[in-house]
Image: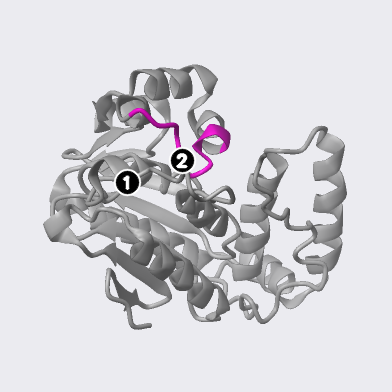
Amino acid sequence: MAYSLIETERDGSVLLVRLNRPDRLNAFNLDMHHELVRLYDEADADNDVRVIVVTGNGRAFCAGADLAAAGDTFNYADDPNHRDVGGELNLRTYACTKPVIAAINGPAVGVGATMTLPMDIRLASETARIGFVFARRGIVADGCASWFLPKVVGISRALEWTLTGRVFDAKEALDAGLVRSVHPPEELLPAALELAREIAENTSAISVTLNRQLMWRMLGADHPMEANQVESRALRAVGSGPDAQEGIGSFLAKRAPKYPGRVPADLPEFYPWWEDRPFRPLP
C-alpha cells in the first residue's frame, strides 16, 4: 500500500492509518479522498486485516477542507452533477467490511469531523477540538452528516452543533456520546490500538463484519421485522459453520478461541444482502 497523503502501519492484524499533511493540519483534499477510498478497498480485500485505526500526524486530526482555492473552494456552479466527495468517502467507510476506529488526536472540524461519523468507535485526546462549522462558512454539512450525526448523538444535539457551527472540546463530545473516551495525548493511540486488538484477538471476523453491517443498515429500517428477517438469515448462514463451532467449543473448554473464518474469503453467500443505491444528482 503506497500512498502520499496518508501513512499506513501494520500492528499484527490491526491496520493503523495516519492522515499525513501535518504542515496543513491534515487538511482534506481530493487526493486524500482518493487515497482513503483506496485504503478501504485494499483493507477490505485483505484477509489479514481485522481492524482499521485512523488518526492524524502532527497536532491535528484533520482541520477540514483545504481552502487553497479561497472563496472558490466550494464553488460547484459549473458542475450540475456535482457529488460531495466527503459523502463519497463516508459511504465507502459505511460499506467497509472491517471495523474502523477513530483516534481523534487534535482539531477535527468540517469534513475532519464528519469523516469520523461512519467510523464505528471514536476516541479523543484531551487536546481535541471538534466542530461542524459549515454554517460559519456559508455552506451546508457534508459527508452525509445529516444522516449520520443525528443517529450518533440525537437530533437536538446534531442541530445545536450544526446550527451554531461552534467548535467544542473533547469533554462535550464525550458527554454527547460522540466519542467513547477521552485520553491524555500520549495515551490516545495506545488506547485505540488496545481496543482494536480486543476485537481482533477475541472475535470472529465473519461475526464482526455481519454485526457491523446489521447495526448500520438497520438504522434505516422502517420496522424491527426487517432486522428479524436479516438476522434469521445470517444465523442460518453462520450457525452451523466453523466459527460458531469454535466459539461454542472454546467457551465450553474455557480456552481462547482460534476462529478460522477470514474476511472477505469466508463471508456467507448471501452477503451483501442489500442493493447499493446509485447516486442521482437532484435537478
Of the pair 220 and 121, the residue shown nearer to us: 220
The residue sitting at 45% across, 34% down in the picture is 141
The residue sitting at 49% across, 70% down in the picture is 50
The kind of secondary structure element at disc 1 is: loop
The residue sitting at 39% across, 43% down in the picture is 75
- Residue type at mark 1 is Thr
Label whose residue precedes the other's in the sequence (2 or 1)? 1
Place of residue 280 in the rendered image (x, y in percent of width and height, measured from the top left): 69, 49
Place of residue 135 in the rendered image (x, y in percent of width and height, measured from the top left): 36, 25
The magenta segment is: 138-147
Of the pair 47 and 70, the residue shown nearer to us: 70
User: Badge 1 is on which residue?
Assistant: 73
Q: Is residue 253 something that shows in the picture?
A: no
Q: Are marks 2 and 1 in contact (CB under 8 Å)?
A: no
Residue 274 to residue 13: above or below: above
Crowd around label 1: few <14 · some 14–19 · many ≥20 (10 Å): few
**Is residue 146 in the magenta section?**
yes
Residue 27 to residue 140: above or below: below
Query: Where's the C terminus, which quadrant?
Result: top right
Residue 247 to residue 150: above or below: below
Q: Is residue 241 left or right of residue 225?
A: left
- Residue type at mark 2 is Asp
User: Badge 2 is on which residue?
Assistant: 142
Place of residue 191 in the rendered image (x, y in percent of width and height, measured from the top left): 29, 54
Of the pair 249 and 81, the residue shown nearer to us: 81
Place of residue 227 in the rendered image (x, y in percent of width and height, measured from the top left): 80, 43
